[in-house]
Amino acid sequence: MSISKSVCYGNISNYHPSISIPENLKYDLVCTRCNSVYFDDRLKCDTDNGLLRANYRNKKLELKNVHGVGKFHDWLPVDDLITTDAGSVTYRSTELASHLGLNNLFIGFNGYWPEKGAYIKTCSFKELEAFPTLTRSKNSGKSLVLASAGNTARAFAHVSAMTGTDVYIVVPGSATSRMWLPEEPTDSIHIIQMGNNCDYTDSIHLAERLAAAPGMQAEGGARNVARRDGMGTVMLDASVSMKQLPDHYFQAIGSGTGGIAAWEASTRLLEDGRFGNGLPQLHLSQNLPFVPMFNAWNAGRRDIIKDIDMPDPKKLIHEMYADILSNREPPYSVPGGVFDSLCATNGTMYAITNNDAKKGVDIFEELEGIDIFPPAGVAVASLIEAVNAGKVKPDDHIVLNITGGGVKRVEQDYHLHKIEPTAHAENANVSLEDLI
């Protein structure tokens, strides 16, 4: 699909203005809409709604001699080196690649698969967000508040258990089965479970109220550069492994923050100069019947129109196979968001049926040898659709982001502990006194 560049916001090169930066700063924050520059850690621009982006002083990526996400320290908005085995692992596919007739298919695996060197024990790439986010906020003296449909909650709870950092996590009732850890939960983890009629967006609204209470601070979601740059390490690891940027990048999205992160990481690699001279094309997928970003994009609109793009959203979300991909207020329209990432990369969006997503899960486990989460099955299905439609060529370099997998494998090595909620909330308007 072709979108007029007149409806997209500026060129990404404009987001890195020439400015005198204080010597001791690793990065500044630049507004993607107005180019305002900030030297403190914040979530929003003072003058408009654009996402803030980290502008790192080191333009050449130098890997640190550690495992996991910490090796990309130069391009993470933290001062302390993150030491964890958890990180994205890139490997060249043989079986799935052969099945699809692809010669350069690379898997970005984000889960637990020790045989591949993958040690994300919560089995989701959300751990890539949790480590830098909690590292960045640990000296604030406040408890971090966030909302989650499941995987993010597990990841942040895991890092909280490891570090002792207090987190308050609001989850919908549908997330109950996803509330587990590979270790005993600690008192630093506070799970607030909402009623069964509430969804992820209800959780976001309650988390916003909770974050405004004394002693609390909002984690920030897509506006938090630590989350985006943590997720962006999937693209960094893949490009370093391939020694070039890919031609195509496939990922399923709920909020779309991972797609934004992949775009931002790609621009830094372009500026580095050693990984090629073109941005990867983003291939982002949603799970039918809840596909608001797909609908808006294919209508050529920057704005999501709720009555058109997601009528009766809670009913649609209930019918999804990968219900975790269900954000009713995604960062699609915001400057520097999903719409702009698709514009900048000549991107494509897909609407994947439940049946095709389930087939994606099954075919990946059969051919690659590891179980994966439903959202990853949506991404696999979008790759199959792209191959069948001729949107990718046999020799193209392709990265498929498997955003979660390996639960069956982690169960062999660890006893999984259920995280019990510390409070319940029937809706987003309950009294906060009962939750803290």
Image (cartoon, rainbow, N blue to C red):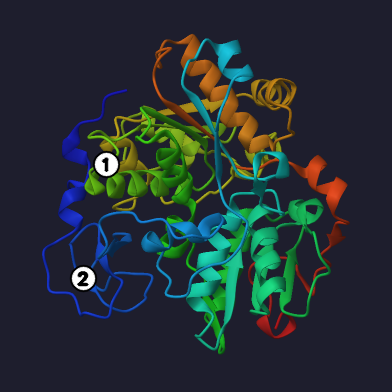
> In front here: 202 or 76?
76
SS at badge 2? strand
Name the residue at 54% across, 89% down.
141
Going from the N terminus, do you reach mark 2 or mark 1 first? 2
The answer to whether residue 243 is above or below residue 356 is below
Name the residue at 87% across, 46% down.
412
Q: Quadrant of residue 244?
A: top left
Q: Which residue is mark 1?
A: 274
Determine if residue 384 is in view.
yes
Name the residue at 49% across, 14% down.
102
Q: Quadrant of residue 8?
A: top left
Q: Position of residue 156 (x, y in %)?
A: 64, 65
SS at badge 1? loop
Q: Quadrant of the N terminus?
A: top left
Name the residue at 21% across, 79% down.
23
Q: Disc 2 marks which amino acid? A: Val
Image depth: mark 2 or mark 1 in front: 1
User: What number is the disc on residue 37?
Assistant: 2
Q: Position of residue 269 (x, y in %)?
A: 30, 46
Q: Position of residue 33 (x, y in %)?
A: 22, 57
